[in-house]
Amino acid sequence: MTWHVRAVGLPYGEDPGDWWIDESGEMHDEPIADADDLPGEFVLPGLADAHAHPAIGADGVTPLAWAKQQTADWGDIGVCLIRDVGSPGGVTLDITPTAGSPLYVSAGRFLAPAGRYFPELLVEPVEVEELTAAAVAEVDKGATWVKVIADFPNFEAGTGPEPNYPLDVIAAMIEAVHAKGARVAAHCTIDNVDALVAAGIDSIEHGSGLTEDVISDMAARGTAWTPTLSAMTALRDSPDTPAAIRDRIRESCERLGDLLPTAVMLGVPVLAGTDTYGPISKEVALLAELGLTPTQALAAASVWPRQYLGVTGRADIVTYAHDPREDPSQLDNPTAVVVDGVRRR
Ligand SMILES: [Zn+2]
């Protein structure tokens, strides 16, 4: 199946043009015979959510037997690529993609020691001496990423985030995972992020301890950053969050507003990720609020993650009646959606 649309090419385009899209998703400006016409004035090669948890409920702590309903919704609004960054017990590794389903890049189970992550989600804790073997086991089961919880607060003691594993242990795990051709994402909210980046971590999730120096190092190494602003601002604005933590998050948000444009300028792959606080339109709006241009914010939820995760060979097409760069809420109401060559809308 091939497609034709007369539209402005997103995220960078200015003027409408005619586009023909082949089975592999490649956009051509030369006609392809018998292409099916798609409606819409703006066209994007698929949305992407680079930090999501298909196996966790919207409350952030209830494990689901990987949420078919949620993923159906993702496909319907044109989220064609989802990086799962951790699931209880690694259930997302059992996802069997069906025709027209988003592409899942799965990390398997959360890697954290007992008592050092949300207990509802940590069905199999991983102690310090088990880290490398546990990470490699997830890769052997099909994970192309693994997710290490590099730090976490101690809720019982009421203390802030502390490292979960010694740095040399994380470094050895990264080396073993890389040797198997997979990559490592780290939940990281404190200032040991410089050492994690130096140890070769592939993507920093959250990253509230980042500084301009670390951002420069990430740019040099090609380390990605998924700031998950939807999660951060939800916690900041929740009346259930203790006042001291709310203040800390407010400060972080202000700093991120300086760091995000710098990261993009230096070439750090900045990726939009909703965590458990979708939809993706909200994350795009927040990225723009915190200093990215509307075009960059949309690229962070589409072409940048596709490129960073090496996605090719899929006809993922979403069209819109109005420009989502002017109003990110347009992303919730696409005109036409094709996921991996299957028309969903
Ligand atoms: Zn997460």
Image (cartoon, helix red, strand yellow):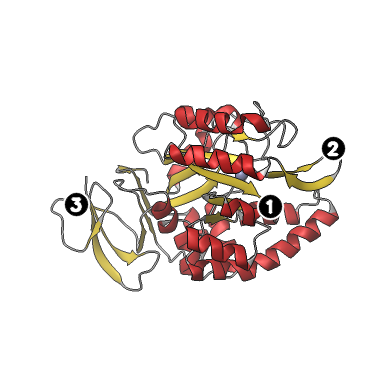
Instruction: Decide if residue 7 is on the left or right side of residue 248.
Output: left
Residue that mark 1 sits on? 189
Tell me the mark number nearer the camera, choosing from 3 and 1: 1
Residue type pointed to by label 2: Glu
Q: Quadrant of residue 42 in the image?
A: bottom left
Residues 257 and 195: in front is 195
* Mark 1 crowdedness (10 Å alpha carbons): few <14, some 14-19, many ≥20: many
Residue 49 seen anywhere in this rendered image of the structure: yes
Q: Determine the residue located farthest toward the bottom in the rendered image.
A: 14
Of mark 1 and mark 2, the one earlier in the sequence is 2
Residue that mark 3 sits on? 35
Of mark 3 and mark 1, the one earlier in the sequence is 3
Q: Give me the residue at 47% from left, 34% from top.
A: 143
Q: Position of residue 321 (x, y in %)?
A: 40, 62
Residue type pointed to by label 1: Thr
- Tell me the SS state at disc 3: loop
Residues 311 and 160: in front is 160
Q: Position of residue 188 (x, y in %)?
A: 65, 50
